[in-house]
Amino acid sequence: MREQKVPRGRCVIMIEACEESGSYDLPYYVDHLIERIGRPSLVVCLDSGCGDYDRLWLTTSLRGIAAGTLTVRVLTEGVHSAMPPASWRRRSASCAG
């Protein structure tokens, strides 16, 4: 194609492969190569997930994602940390007798 001077499309690929989250090197290289990169007409970001399609999402960890509902109940009376619950004391007394 080059020898025949046939126009062809241009594809610029930038791979960010930082070992941990943060991509601390990426902004430097984008700034340094901005003239060679030009103005892209399409940006594709391969990532582990995204919350919506309105913005570009970045993953901060690939160790896993957990979702759930946490229910917290607060004690209604004070308890000394060295004192076992009353239910344990009743079992112990019934076993000893």
Image (tube, helix red, strand yellow):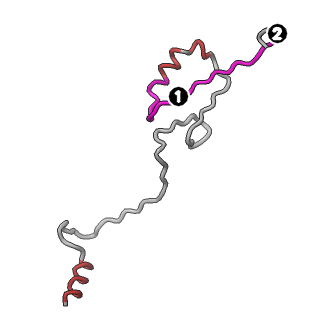
The answer to which of marks 1 and 2 sits earlier in the sequence is 2
Q: Position of residue 88 (x, y in %)?
A: 25, 78
In the image, what residue occupies the spot 21% across and 68% down?
A: 78
Q: Position of residue 15 (x, y in %)?
A: 56, 27
In the image, what residue occupies the spot 79% across and 8% down?
A: 3
Cα separation, mark 1 vs mark 2, equals: 35 Å
Badge 2 is on which residue? 4
Which span of residues is magenta-colored?
A: 5-26
- The quadrant of the image that shows the C terminus is bottom left
In this picture, is 7 found above or below 56?
above
Residue type, label 2: Gln
- The quadrant of the image that shows the N terminus is top right
Label 2 SS: loop
Badge 1 is on which residue? 16
Q: Is residue 38 magenta?
A: no
In the image, what residue occupies the spot 70% across and 18% down?
A: 10
Q: Which mark, residue 54? A: none
Residue type, label 1: Glu
* Residue 7 located left or right of residue 66: right
Q: Is residue 15 magenta?
A: yes
